[in-house]
Amino acid sequence: MTRISTQLTRITLLAASGLLALFLNVTSHAGEGERQVGRYQTMVLTPSDEQIDLLSNIVDVEFPEEINTLGQAVTHLLDGSGYRLLSATLAEPNRSHLFAMPLPTVQRHLGPLHLRQALQLLGGPAHRLVVEPTYRLVSFELIKKASSANDYSDQ
């Protein structure tokens, strides 16, 4: 009896290892830089465009009632984006004037837009969005010759 049970155990182990090898062959179709996500599906392991360029994320925001100025709106937009405002001591003096301006009613809801576009929209045609990617800082600078409102129609 022990000899038969030993042989049955060996056969069972061989069958189990064969099934395991078959399973590994079926599920290991993912190549280098891919991950198996289903029996017949793989996923390429690359970051999305939004993960590479944080300002290209889509935002659709309704500003809360307590946000009344452009500065508060910009700060709200940047919250959680990975970017922050350049400190006021290093920014152009004109930025403080821009940020003190009231948030226009028509801009209380922005989106869906790329974050970069939403920030530039808040800055208006007289200001250029300045991005410092190394330290993930944003600011605004006054454009020497303010452009007309019609310049937005081409963007």
Image (tube, rainbow, N blue to C red):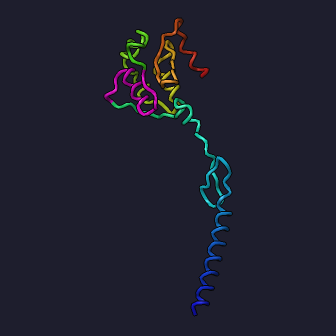
The magenta region covers 65-85
Which residue is depicted at the point 68% across and 57% down? 29
Q: Is residue 56 above or below residue 17?
A: above
Q: Residue furthest left?
A: 66
Q: Position of residue 79 (x, y in %)?
A: 41, 31
Residue 46 placement: quadrant: top right
Residue 137 is left or right of residue 2, and the answer is: left
Residue 7 placement: quadrant: bottom right
Q: Is residue 43 above or below residue 88?
A: below
Q: Position of residue 150 (x, y in %)?
A: 57, 15
Residue 36 placement: quadrant: bottom right
Is residue 121 on the magenta stretch? Answer: no
Quarter of the picture containing the C terminus is top right
Which residue is depicted at the point 52% across and 29% down? 55
Q: Position of residue 126 (x, y in %)?
A: 49, 12
Q: Residue furthest bottom?
A: 1
Quarter of the picture containing the N terminus is bottom right
Q: Is residue 46 above or below residue 86?
A: below
Q: Position of residue 133 (x, y in %)?
A: 52, 24
Which residue is depicted at the point 63% across and 61% down? 39
Q: Residue furthest top?
A: 144
Name the one closer to the observer, 119 or 110.
119
Name the one closer to the observer, 38 or 146.
38
Name the one closer to the observer, 73 or 34.
34
